[in-house]
């Protein structure tokens, strides 16, 4: 069909979310390693506006849409790098787990996620 497989957009969202944490000064893997926390996806949605084609370069941008000590919502925009065309928008909601149980995010990560 010449278009990118639909699930790749979720991967691009994950990459943008990981990079957002990194540019805010925290590597996601350090949250797991140092605090034993995992941020699991509770909900994901993606609205496809137009297809990316094979070999297109894309830009995936993430922002924190809403933050609560127990749940963070990220919003995404995926665009074509060559012409800026909007390819997809989406959101993911994440819970924090430690030892398989929901927990509040530690205070040391409040700034990362925009919590007060």
Image (tube, rainbow, N blue to C red):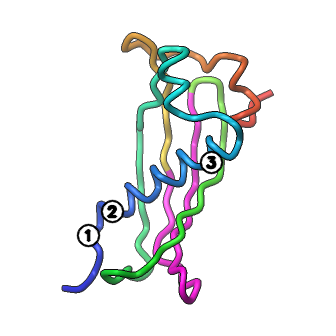
| Residue 92 vertical position relative to residue 86 in the rendered view, above or below | above
Question: Residue 76, image x and y in percent?
Answer: 55, 59
Question: Residue 29, image x and y in percent?
Answer: 49, 30
Q: Give me the residue at 53% from left, 45% from top.
A: 18
Q: How far apart are marks 1 and 3 (CA)?
A: 24 Å
Q: Mark 1 points at which residue?
A: 5
Under circle 1, the secondary element is loop
Q: How far apart are marks 2 and 3 (CA)?
A: 18 Å
User: As rendered, which of 49 and 13 lies closer to the eye?
Assistant: 13
Disc with the residue nearer the chain's start (2 vs 3)? 2
| Residue 1 vertical position relative to residue 67 in the rendered view, above or below | below
Mark whose residue sits in front, 1 or 3: 3
Q: How far apart are marks 1 and 2 (CA)?
A: 6 Å
Magenta region, residue range: 71-91
Question: Splitting the image into 4 quarters, where does residue 112 fall?
Answer: top right
Which circle marks residue 8 in the picture?
A: 2
Q: Are circles 1 and 2 on residues that touch, CB within 8 Å?
A: yes
**Helix, strand or loop: magenta stretch:** strand
Under circle 2, the secondary element is helix
Q: Does the magenta stretch include residue 43?
A: no
Q: Give me the residue at 56% from left, 31% from top.
A: 71
Q: Give me the residue at 49% from left, 35% from top.
A: 94
Q: Are circles 1 and 3 on residues that touch, CB within 8 Å?
A: no
Q: Name the residue under label 3.
A: 20
| Residue 83 vertical position relative to residue 23 in the rendered view, above or below | below
Under circle 3, the secondary element is helix
């Amino acid at each position: 069909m010449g278009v990118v497989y639909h699930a790749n957009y979720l991967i691009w969202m994950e990459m943008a979310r990981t990079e957002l944490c990194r540019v805010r000064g925290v590597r996601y893997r350090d949250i797991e390693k140092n605090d034993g926390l995992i941020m699991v996806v509770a909900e994901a949605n993606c609205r496809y506006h137009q297809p990316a084609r094979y070999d297109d370069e894309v830009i995936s941008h993430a922002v924190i849409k809403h933050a609560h000590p127990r749940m963070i919502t990220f919003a995404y925009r995926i665009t074509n790098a060559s012409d800026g065309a909007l390819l997809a928008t989406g959101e993911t909601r994440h819970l924090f787990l430690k030892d398989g149980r929901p927990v509040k995010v530690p205070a040391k990560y409040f700034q990362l996620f925009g919590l007060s």
